[in-house]
């Protein structure tokens, strides 16, 4: 029956690592991490390497013989760490600042050791039930009502992809079975300030870039609900089928908050799926006095919040909350015979809630982080980040020649330097030089965006180690660079 | 300009974990992991819990105050571990057996500590370049030619989704811009034995379930190329647009290997994208005398191999090799202003190669594992797993009343007990009882599938700790259960 290649004789050297060796190097790694946690603020934030410099130090071919872990760790310290941009640095203010805090690192250590794949309840009962319970905790922490069921995806891009796929399924066009050929054009709505992952989900799902319509925003970068309603009416009149609206709580450029209640009104009237992208901003709702950022979100069909963004959990951990989880199951669930289990439909099988079958134990780090911080500890840090951002915004507002370019509803400040007498294009170039100069110091890291066509600098507070001193130092570097460039 | 909620006074208690606390509990966790590695074989393989039992032991709400890590680790040991199905157990023979080996656990510890998001080269230069280099190492280890560029995704499901999306883009129908409405029906081909993730990718991408056509297989569960050619011709005649064929190297039910060279001939002739799903089977190619499993794969457009399946890397780590990576970029790349960097197009930005923007440092664990094992150490273990599977197959073949139901080209044996005088349906029920009885012992874990409509048992060897003794014990339990049930 078989035609099998001959096997070489059995080797005695299996290359396996012994528990003793793991113990030795595990303790060494823990010491390194503790020192890294204490000293990351002394390292350059942005990796001071040129493209290709790291690769040039790595052998072109893998070793034939096993190497010792001493050597591997030496190369990690000598080659990898100096080529790393330190997202854990207290002066990392670019994009959205994050933290891989200790409780989550310990959680990742244990998750890697268990190496559990909870695709089915049966293959990870504790993994499945801990995910459900921990996500219900987070639901309570951000003030969402009962009935929303959470599931963990790797990134907000995938959470959004799942949400929009569910919206497409909910439209009742039979896409799961028959696909999209021959259907009328579908339309997804979001604002001009929406994250690129929404448009990317549209591309992946076969809606196409033109299937995503970007609604204009107001002076504070929030979606204009009247323009949304108008676009929907216009599309319907043209035979296009609206099916989903994405509202953002905390846009990437300015952290603006779309008027979710007004958008929810429109979605209810029009029968459209409402997805709320609160990947960054949703975390602010753990602070009781900031809970208003999620106003209206309880009326959404789906909401994404990323604990790996602003709740101090190491990436990746994106949570997707669903009001009707059965729609996602209808969109995605497929159970071949080899995945049928005796428990049948009586249990949650996590593989049913997204495009990936395999399921890493991501709930552990979230659970450990929420417990170690507690609701109040978590709120205290997020609150402090918002305070630091407002402090910085105040400095910008008070200094001649500088201007703030957007409100600061959370922990992101968007601003620029505007020397007298410079035209628009020159002001843009000046701010780009300024940012490059500041980032090149290795002492702080900002990023940029464009608002109304003009270059704007972004300072995002989100790292646990960030103190007033770090924010003040960034401001000092900016002011110095402004006078020098 | 702003209307901001009032913030409560600043809290002194930040809830942060200190390096000293991390050190203390980090060392405790390392000790726990070392003991777990040494003792996992003594635990029940399948978690002996009923649905809801773990959840019932977890509080319904999160703690308000921070909790100590002593307490958190106690609950991990007392509640989570007993509710875990131990994929690391040497007698885990279900699905495809895997290992989270020591080098990869150490890699995950360090990756979680760095908490780097390498979405852009700039935000993770070492992360980006290590991924490229390590994937080139793996390319060499499995004998793929130069020119294939690797990228890491979380799971094979997502790797396949990316590959099929690229195939859709390569068809030149303008799907990225205009979507799929109004296009003729597209068709994706795979065999009846192909993994469900292919059909799921089709659903996600808007091709629909009916857009995936399953080609019949031969007596050894391999796709029939003549049937494939016929289906393509039939579809073209009906106005359907073929665009992609998925061939499998190591199917889930039997580890059968589709005739890739013959399928590649058809794809070249018909101008179709060839994706090779070698998520499990590709790893066998690290053994020089088994390299033939990838015959013809060098002619594919894309190939997926999962180091988290059979190369001892903790999940998640799926590698996708692309002959024309620029097609994936064309399908997925979107660069909003806030992600533009000074390096521009001169560098690889990992966000361009899939649906997710955020990018965890998964290359580290793969690099550490490949170095610690070395090419020869890796080959020795995979070779040994194949030897153990053949040994077990020989026992089945030699025992009256038992029958093997498929060839054993790799490390999976598919078989059943067939008592004299039992009809087909009774034989199925008998084997289901037999599997349930064996799995209930907690001493070994098998899974099942259906072949030609009949229940078949699967024993998959893939864990580093598995020895001849564990395989013999599974056989002993099976024989005992067969006489008792």
Image: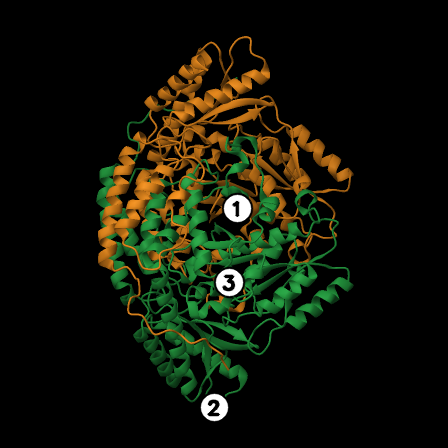
Chain colours: A green, B orange
Question: On the image, numbered disc 1 is attached to which residue?
Answer: B158
Q: CA distance from mark 1 to mark 2?
A: 52 Å
Against B482, is B62 above or below? below
Per the image, the residue denoted by label 2 is A420
Q: Which residue is mark 3?
A: A278
Give me the chain letter of mark 3. A
Is disc 3 placed on a helix, strand or loop?
Answer: loop
Left or right, B260 with reference to B138? right
Q: Are marks 1 and 2 in contact (CB under 8 Å)?
A: no
The extreme bottom residue here reads A421
Q: Nearer the viewer, residue A189 or B16?
A: B16
Crowdedness of circle 3 by 10 Å Cα count: few (<14), some, many (20+)?
A: many
- B13 vs B141, left or right, is left
| Image quadrant where residue A234 sits | bottom right
> From mark 3 to mark 2, how far is it between C-alphas?
38 Å
Q: Chain of mark 1?
A: B
Discs 3 and 2 carry the same chain letter: yes
């Amino acid at each position: 029956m078989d035609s099998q290649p001959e096997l070489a004789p059995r080797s005695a050297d299996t290359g396996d690592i012994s528990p003793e060796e793991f113990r030795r190097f595990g303790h060494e790694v823990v010491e390194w991490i503790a020192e890294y946690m204490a000293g990351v603020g002394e390292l350059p934030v942005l990796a001071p390497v040129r493209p290709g410099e790291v690769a040039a130090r790595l052998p072109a071919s893998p070793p034939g013989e096993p190497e010792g872990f001493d050597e591997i760790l030496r190369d990690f310290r000598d080659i990898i760490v100096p080529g790393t941009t330190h997202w854990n640095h207290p002066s990392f203010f670019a994009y959205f600042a994050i933290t891989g805090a200790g409780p989550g690192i310990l959680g990742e250590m244990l998750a890697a050791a268990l190496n559990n794949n909870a695709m089915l309840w049966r293959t990870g009962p504790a993994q499945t039930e801990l995910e459900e319970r921990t996500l219900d905790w987070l639901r309570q922490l951000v003030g969402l009502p009962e009935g929303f069921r959470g599931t963990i995806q790797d990134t907000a891009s995938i959470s959004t992809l799942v949400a929009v796929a569910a919206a497409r399924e909910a439209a009742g066009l039979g896409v799961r079975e028959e696909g999209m050929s021959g259907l009328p054009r579908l339309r997804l709505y979001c604002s001009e300030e929406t994250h690129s992952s929404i448009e990317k989900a549209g591309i992946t799902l076969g809606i196409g870039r033109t299937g995503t319509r970007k609604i204009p925003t107001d002076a504070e970068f929030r979606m204009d609900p009247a323009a949304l309603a108008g676009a929907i009416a216009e599309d319907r009149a043209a035979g296009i089928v609206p099916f989903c609206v994405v509202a953002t709580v905390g846009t990437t450029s300015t952290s603006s908050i779309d008027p979710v209640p007004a958008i929810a009104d429109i979605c209810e009237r029009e029968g459209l799926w409402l997805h709320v992208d609160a990947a960054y901003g949703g975390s602010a709702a753990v602070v009781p006095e900031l809970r208003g950022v999620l106003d209206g979100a309880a009326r959404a069909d789906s909401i994404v919040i990323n604990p790996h963004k602003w709740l101090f959990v190491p990436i990746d951990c994106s949570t997707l909350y669903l009001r009707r989880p059965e729609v996602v199951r209808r969109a995605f669930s497929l159970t071949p015979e080899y995945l049928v289990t005796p428990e049948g439909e009586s249990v949650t099988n996590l593989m049913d809630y997204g495009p990936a079958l395999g399921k890493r134990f991501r709930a552990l780090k979230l659970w450990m982080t929420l417990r170690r911080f507690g609701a109040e500890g978590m709120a205290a840090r997020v609150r402090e980040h918002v305070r630091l951002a407002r402090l910085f915004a105040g400095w910008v507002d008070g200094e001649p020649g500088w201007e703030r370019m957007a409100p600061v509803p959370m922990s992101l400040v968007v601003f620029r330097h505007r020397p007298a007498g410079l035209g628009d294009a020159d002001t843009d170039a000046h701010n780009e030089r300024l940012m490059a100069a500041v980032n090149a110091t290795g002492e702080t890291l900002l990023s940029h965006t464009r608002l109304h066509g003009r270059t704007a600098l972004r300072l995002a507070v989100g790292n646990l180690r960030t103190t007033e001193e770090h924010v003040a130092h960034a401001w000092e570097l900016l002011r110095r660079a402004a006078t020098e460039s």
